[in-house]
Image: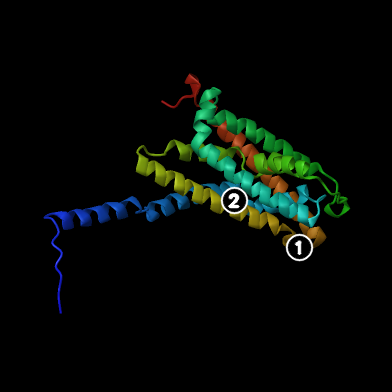
Amino acid sequence: MLVYRLDLPRGAGLRAVRDRKAASAMFDVPIRPILEHAALVFAALFPIVNPVGGAPLFLVLTSDLTHAERALLARQIGINALLLILASIFLGSYVIEFFGLSVPVIQVAGGLLICSMAWDLLRSEEALSEVKVRPRDAAALSARAFYPMTLPLTVGPGSISIAITLGAQVPRGVSAWTVSIAGAALGALLLALSIWLLFRNAERLTRALGATGTQVLLRFSAFILLCIGVQIVWSGMFALIGTIPTFRPR
């Protein structure tokens, strides 16, 4: 039996090992930091977006749509929310700086808009069962999905201000920036999925509550929305008042 021996140049084996380690390091994705950042984004935005409380409002504002149109609208709202949150995280601070705005001003304006819409819902005397279902075209549904369903009812000024704050804390460096982008995208995607699932299944809630229970829940949700709008306005006004020299804490 013949055995052939292959003699490699000195140091070739060590170089091959180093090359394999370098190649594996290039594809070593930091999973744990990405998941931690995604959890931070989701935990910070989910209570503010509150798709659980927004599901009854979604139902009353889409009571004139068919089941298929409502499902399509829920999916579009989830997509719009994903894009709007990511844009607020990575571009929000540059946009408000370009227009010379501040986060408190956005809070006041957005809070007033939410208060106006919540007040209209509270004063509405049209019952949910009395609304006539009329088919709508795709363009009308797309426009309605963004305003008012996505902005400001789902992703409002409170969510945008928190997303801008999260974006301002992005660390420098290619590795940290990559982790931040991947984590923010994953967290926003999970939030968008929760919005889509809860809005899509809002009809099951009405079937469980009945007509009277649904009306009570809708009025209560509109009142809570009005309170949220007032709270957002007050937070923005309080921050603006603090910029006046006379009212600055000493």
Residue 51 left/right relative to 131: left
Residue 212: % across, % down: 81, 59
Residue 17: % across, % down: 21, 57
Q: Which mark is residue 192?
A: 2
Which badge, 1 or 2, is on the more N-terminal residue? Answer: 2
* Residue 95 makes an appearance in the image: yes
Q: Which mark is residue 209?
A: 1
Residue 235: % across, % down: 56, 35
**Residue 177 picture quarter:** top left
What residue is shown at x 37% (from left), y 53% (from top)? 29
| Amino acid beneath label 2 | Ala
Element on which disc 2 rests: helix
Cα distance between the residues tagged 1 and 2: 26 Å
| Amino acid beneath label 1 | Leu
Looking at the image, is 24 positioned above or below residue 112? Answer: below
What residue is shown at x 27% (from left), y 51% (from top)? 22
Q: Residue furthest left?
A: 10
